[in-house]
Amino acid sequence: MANSVDEVIVKLSAGFNRIFNDFKGVYLFGIHTDGNMHEGEDIELAGIFDIEDKSKREQIWPIVGKIETEMDVCIDFYPYTQESFKQDEEIYQEVMENGIFFDKNGKRISTK
């Protein structure tokens, strides 16, 4: 299992940066915002891109799957544009209340 959620996010961000030039970063939300790994709990992430479509999702899932396997974690990844993210009211509200943003390089930018 990964040593930290931050480590997972850095690795995921590096994978996205190799393929996408429009990756903006990810929001971490849910139980893992306390910074600890929770065995049996998925790491919930909302990724922000300039463009989000079927083609991009087909490229995202192999990256997520590879990291899940390598780091022995489960990731719930939700790809969005900034606009579509705001339209998903339930997740957007939770992220704005309790989420943590990591920039495109996986650097923690804001905390709760």
Image (cartoon, rainbow, N blue to C red):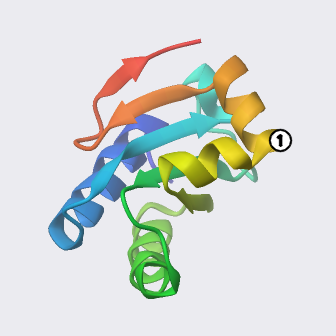
Q: What is the residue that sits farthest to the right in this orientation?
A: 90
Q: What is the residue that sits farthest to the top in this orientation?
A: 112
- Per the image, label 1 sits on a secondary structure element best described as helix
Q: Is residue 33 above or below residue 90?
A: above
Residue for point 65% across, 24% down = 96
Residue 2 coordinates in the image, percent (x, y): 45, 49
**Residue 45 or 57: which is nearer the viewer?**
57
Q: In this image, 38 relative to 107: left or right?
A: right
Q: Is residue 20 above or below residue 94?
A: below
Residue for point 52% across, 38% down = 27
**Residue 20 or 2: which is nearer the viewer?**
20
Residue 49 coordinates in the image, percent (x, y): 39, 56
Q: Number of numbered discs present?
A: 1
- Say if residue 24 shows up in the picture: yes
**Residue 84 or 37: which is nearer the viewer?**
84
Residue 98 coordinates in the image, percent (x, y): 68, 20
Residue for point 40% across, 66% down = 51
Q: Which residue is mark 1?
A: 90
Query: Mark 1, residues whose alpha carbon is within 10 Å: few (<14), some, or many (≥20)?
Result: few
Residue 112 coordinates in the image, percent (x, y): 59, 12
Q: In this image, 69 relative to 12: left or right?
A: right
Task: Identify which amino acid the numbered label 1 is placed on.
Answer: Glu
- Say if residue 30 shows up in the picture: no
Q: Is residue 96 above or below residue 44?
A: above
Q: Is residue 25 above or below residue 70?
A: above
Residue 99 placement: quadrant: top right
